[in-house]
Image (tube, rainbow, N blue to C red):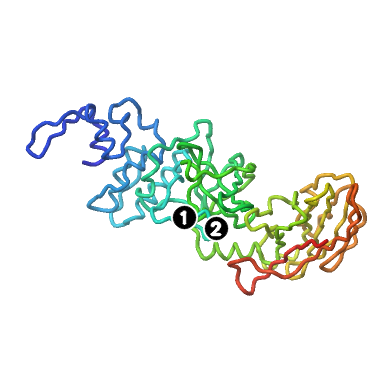
Amino acid sequence: MDLQELIAPEKTTFYDGAWTPVGQKRELAPTLSAITGVSESILTEESELSDHSVAARLSWAASRNASRIEDRAYSLLGILGVFMPMLYGEGSKAFRRLQEEIIKRSNDLTIFAWSSPYSIYSYDGGIDRAGTALLADSPDFFASMGNISPFRNDFFDFSLTNKGVLVPEDLLIRLFSLPGRPGKKIYGIYVGAGEIPGGIYLRKIGPHLFQRCRSLSVLGLWQRFHCNQIGVSPAGPRTYIVADPSRHTDTLWQAFRSRAIHVPKSDTWKLIQVAPDELWDVTDRVLLRRSTYDWDTYPIKVAFRFKARNSPATIDVHCYQEAKSTKPLLTVSQHHRVNPLHDGSFHDTLREEPVRWPSDEHAIVWHNDEDTIEVRYPGYDTVQVRVYLYDDRLPGMDPLTTIYSLRICD
């Protein structure tokens, strides 16, 4: 019996192998629900299909067999309110096409709430930068999502494009710390709620471009996979999540970090602000390049603000790069009256645009790749602080790709 035959009829009588009546669907609902995974309230007609999330309805097809692999997708058309031509011979692509049709007709983010049965949840291991597809390979990936619900107050307008899924500006990109990984941060979005709100982890590829994390495919939803949210911000304009990571995606990851600025953790200074912040990747701690074009020779100015861990002292580090093939120049300064860094003051500049700095900025003297300053700690001694850039490489980067790490010594 397929799902439509089980769900659609108002009355269904079940028989045993000897054709003896066993009972009606309504009275057998608890047993049928336990066997099939279909919600008991659906079998007793106490709820409508639209009351259940897309992920929950897809979970009903998990572990169900069909004589033709395409029928695993086609049997869900009526349950999901989707219409699409049946193309026998397309194999597993039928389920991919089904999900694309769902996205065209629904704003239910639980379509992304799946977990690969081949995934290994490891919070104590490394977080690799490899991505996974945003859409599931089969209904089996939704097997554990029978109780997930969408956020009823969220009416996000998202769409599938040739660049990936375009998410709305007001979708919240969240920042999480991982249990067992002190100080390790990773991006994520909530797509629904199980026992607790949950969703998917994301890795940043470039400005406003993310991919789903392979090694940590689901966050929250169940208490045993609970993570701590430590920050949140709107996605912003034209933000995409890659639908199908490829070698080109890896090339982009490398290109956005090539000759960018990496800020390793320091025992004595804490990074508290960067500008422009949309270029900052909290996972890799890199201020990304805005563009990957080889011919991009437009100058770029960026800024970092650090606070001493053992005093209120702060310093600002400004970096200027004339072209991507040159090492950035830098200067370091200290202000007793700390004003916020303004994103609009530090950005890629077209040739005809003036470079804008804060109105109270003093005349800047640039230094090749290091600068020193005497930092006056309020109520403390004066300390000589050296800031410098050195050639470095992130784990997983191509041996020929260089990144500049920013170090502070006192």
Residue 352 percent location from the top left of the image: 81, 57
Q: Quadrant of residue 126?
A: bottom right
Along the line of sight, which residue is nearer the eye, 106 or 375?
375
From the viewer's perspective, tell me whether residue 341 is left or right of residue 90.
Answer: right
Residue 410 percent location from the top left of the image: 83, 61
From the viewer's perspective, tell me whether residue 142 is left or right of residue 265.
Answer: left
Q: Which residue is mark 1?
A: 133
Along the line of sight, which residue is nearer the eye, 340 or 312?
312
Q: In the image, what residue occupies the spot 81% across and 45% down?
A: 340
The type of residue carrying mark 1 is: Ala
Q: In the image, what residue occupies the spot 26% across and 39% down?
A: 35
Disc 2/disc 1 C-alpha distance (Å):
17 Å
Q: Residue furthest left?
A: 18
As helix, strand or loop, the secondary structure at mark 2 comes to loop
Of marks 2 and 1, the one in the foreground: 2
Q: In the image, what residue occupies the spot 79% across and 47% down?
A: 342
Q: Residues within 10 Å of mark 1 (few under 14, many from 20)?
A: some
Residue 170 percent location from the top left of the image: 61, 39
Residue 127: assigned label: 2
